[in-house]
Image (cartoon, rainbow, N blue to C red):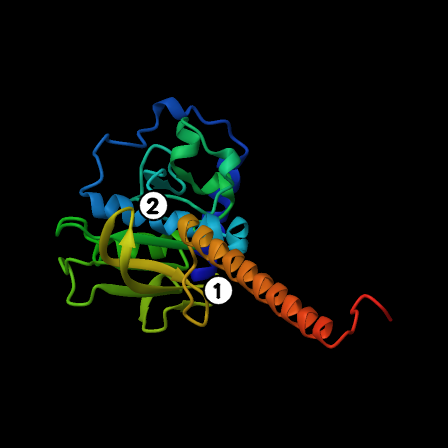
Amino acid sequence: MTELVAQEEQEEIDEFRITKLDLSRIVTENDTPVDNLFSERQMRLLAESLYTSWAAWRGSHLCGDGECRSLFSSAPATARAQCVGQPGCDPARRGRGKEHRSYFVWEYGKPPDIVVEIVSNKVGKELGDKLLDYARLGVAYYIVYDPGQFVSQHPLRIFTRQGLRYTEITDAWLAEVGIGVTLWEGEYEHMTDLWLRWCDQQGVLLATGQEALAEKSQQLAFASQRAEQAERRAAALAAKLAALGIDPELD
């Protein structure tokens, strides 16, 4: 039964991929702003660190940075679920048009690999209808980050798709995609809070642009310090040899 449903969905996707759609008639946004500054920055943090530090992002489709407002599957006139971005898409394809601000499954040939929901109130049904919707759409991993504990006692919940339903997991390493998630307390864009971050299998955070620049500057400073120390040692050695009447330039 599962294989039959998947085949039917793929046929619908293929049909829409070869059909030129009139996107002007599709409602992709309701002009509702992000609920709060934290949610906005949280989504931006997820996207920025992917672009900066994850070489594999070009091969995956993830929802996360606020530029994609809706996720559409087979019916182009209906938004199936609210989405918070698609940092798995090539930035060259992004723009102001609707085709770049929503995730049309038939355009990419597959659903997103990961959907991240940032909970900011009790009305989003993140642990209700969306669990069924995203599983039915074929999203491999569904992550619910609820820092205010509006819908759960646990701030971070991770689900993996099995058949047409999700199963909650405790492992924060998303093996099918090759990336992990973790909670990190620190400062991002002048706001100190508990953030959801991407990480590698060892738990090392994927750096943001500022973090990567700071790390590179630190490495350059360390290399410069080592070079200065080597020069001082060489000068001291030359002075000792000169005191002994030995010319270091001679063989």
The image quarter containing residue 237 is bottom right
Which amino acid type is marked by label 2? Answer: Arg
Where 108 sits versus 171, above or below? above
Question: Residue at label 2?
Answer: 44
The image quarter containing residue 142 is bottom left
- Where residue 133 appears, as percent x and y from the top left, is 30, 52
Residue displayed at 32% across by 45% down: 84
Q: Could you tell me how far apart the alpha carbons at marks 2 and 1 are, in whole angstroms?
A: 23 Å
Q: Is mark 1 on a helix, strand or loop?
A: loop
Q: Which of marks 2 and 1 is in front?
A: 2
- Where residue 171 appears, as percent x and y from the top left, is 36, 73
Indicate which disc residue 248 carries: none
- Where residue 76 appears, as percent x and y from the top left, is 38, 34
Q: Is residue 121 left or right of residue 163?
A: left
Q: In which quarter of the image is the N terminus?
A: bottom left
Q: Is residue 203 left or right of residue 191?
A: right
Q: Is mark 2 on a helix, strand or loop?
A: helix
- Where residue 194 appears, as percent x and y from the top left, is 23, 60
Residue displayed at 27% across by 54% down: 187
Q: Nearer the viewer, residue 63 or 126?
A: 63
Residue displayed at 50% across by 57% down: 221
Mark 2 or 1, nearer chain start? 2
Which amino acid type is marked by label 1? Answer: Glu
